[in-house]
Image: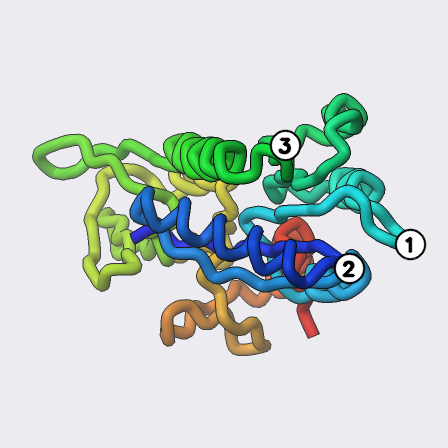
Amino acid sequence: MLQFHIAVCDDEPFAASSISGAAERELARQGAQADIEVFNGVEPLARRLDDVAFDLVLLDIEMPDVDGITFGRALREDGSKTEIVFVSNSEDRVFESLPLRPLSFVRKSHFTEDMAQAMVAFVRAWKSSRTERVVTLKMAHAMGTFSADEILYVEARGRDKMMHMTNGHVETVLVTLDELAERLAPLGFYRVHKGFLVNFAHVSQLSSKGLTVAGELIPISRSKTAEVKLAYMDFLSKKNAVMM
């Protein structure tokens, strides 16, 4: 089942509850499950974004202090690619929001209809983005297509390249580690050792001994320790995460 982490931001508690409930119901109709956090203003949402990344933010426009469009603009200026859906009675501000590339605009006067369409658009956009995160590789007797998000790390054992997957399987592919590193680098993978290529998205700990991935300690070449740490910190910053 698809699972999403969603933020709802509206200064009116009843409206925030209605938005949260409607989003959850519409996503359930599409076979998806939502972990939804509700915020009564942009300041607590901004603080939360220091720690986690949301797949979608449902933002009211008319809020005290900082309105939704101003906050959305700040998100985009920070490089956030989190999908934004504006929810508002202020239909005249639709065009003002367009430069921020919102996924949709939910009018409170057409709430049920617009919310359904917005959640369909969100799931469609999410699936479309994931189709770009696949890689097709030569195997012993066929070509295999794999989701980059399901690859934990790649290990070179002699001439074999073993892809360790999130489901516990190990897939052997007939390509060089150099080629894999080049193809997977844009998808968040990093060559941390002459024999290992790691998906930073699955790293749970970085220490002087190496990277911990799914309970396994992956060594880092001594000469690359500083380089790997900087690359991992850069990856975290782009994901709105922090490294303590």
Instruction: Label 2: state its secondary structure.
Output: loop
- Write down the residue under mark 3: 105
Observer-nearest of 221 and 237: 237
- The way the protein has been coloured in the rendering is rainbow
Q: Residues within 10 Å of mark 2 (few under 14, many from 20)?
A: many
Q: Which mark is residue 65?
A: 1
- Relative height, residue 114 to residue 223 (above, below): above
Give above or below for 53 relative to 86. below
**Residue 149 rendering spot, x and y as whole percentages:** 39, 49
Dot 2 or dot 3, earlier in sequence: 2
Amino acid type of disc 3? Phe
Q: Residue at x 33, y 56 (%)?
A: 155
Residue 153 visible somewhere in the drawing: no
* C-alpha span from label 2 to label 3: 19 Å
x and y percentages locating residue 79 in the rendered image = 73, 41
Residue under numbered circle 2: 41
Determine contact: label 2, label 1, CB under 8 Å.
Answer: yes
Q: In the rendering, at what x and y percent does residue 83 appear?
A: 60, 40
Which residue is painted at 56% across and 72% down in the image?
Answer: 206
Q: Quadrant of residue 84?
A: top right
Image quarter where the C terminus lies is: bottom right
Q: Residue furthest right?
A: 65
